[in-house]
């Protein structure tokens, strides 16, 4: 099965980098395939009891700057690989953002790493890759 509109969810983790390598292989296998890499990020939130504690603006800026840096690195890797593609930074809940982006852009497949940079939140709420696999309406390749 060949895919021409490939969506890669990327967060910079080890598994995500392996998924990036596999996505490049997929894109190189099909003439005129497009590889879109999205880096979905969300600003940190701290809950105290039932309330939400304010996060200093400098912390949010640091998160945003790191997210932008990640997207720039992705653009460089795409250029080095010589595949037709683009990289985008999207804000929101990662699994929901990935699914919405895939639907809106008629992606043929979603490629994602098996474990990301989620930490304790991932443990409590379920991993991004698991949520994407459970809710996607197109094939999902989870790379370990």
Image (cartoon, grey):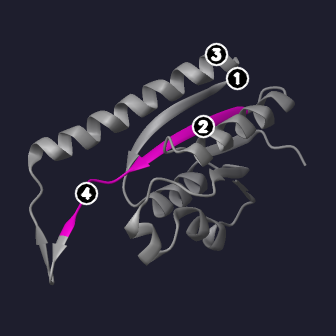
Which region is colored magenta? 34-46
Q: Mark 4 or mark 3: which comes first in sequence? A: 4
Nearest to viewer (mark 2 / mark 3): 3
Disc 4 element: loop
Residue 35 lies in the magenta stretch:
yes
The residue wearing badge 1 is 83
Give me the residue at 52% from left, 29% from top. Answer: 74
Give me the residue at 72% from left, 51% from top. Answer: 109
The residue wearing badge 4 is 44
The residue wearing badge 3 is 80
In the picture provided, is 6 more to the left or to the right than 125? right
Give me the residue at 64% from left, 16% from top. Answer: 80
Nearest to viewer (mark 1 / mark 3): 3
In the picture provided, is 127 more to the left or to the right than 66? right
Most prominent secondary structure in the magenta stretch?
Answer: strand
Q: Mark 2 or mark 3: which comes first in sequence? A: 2
């Amino acid at each position: 099965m060949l895919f021409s509109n490939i969506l890669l969810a990327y967060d910079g983790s080890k598994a995500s980098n392996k998924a990036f390598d596999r996505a490049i292989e997929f894109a190189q296998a099909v003439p005129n395939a497009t590889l879109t890499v999205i880096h979905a990020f969300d600003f940190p939130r701290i809950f105290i009891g039932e309330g939400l504690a304010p996060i200093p603006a400098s912390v949010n800026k640091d998160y945003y700057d790191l997210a932008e840096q990640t997207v720039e690195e992705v653009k460089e890797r795409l250029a080095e690989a010589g595949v037709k593609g683009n990289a985008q930074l999207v804000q929101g809940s990662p699994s929901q953002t990935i699914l919405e982006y895939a639907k809106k852009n008629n992606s043929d497949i979603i490629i994602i790493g098996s474990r990301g940079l989620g930490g304790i939140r991932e443990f409590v709420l379920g991993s991004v890759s698991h949520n994407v696999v459970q809710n996607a309406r197109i094939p999902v390749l989870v790379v370990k």
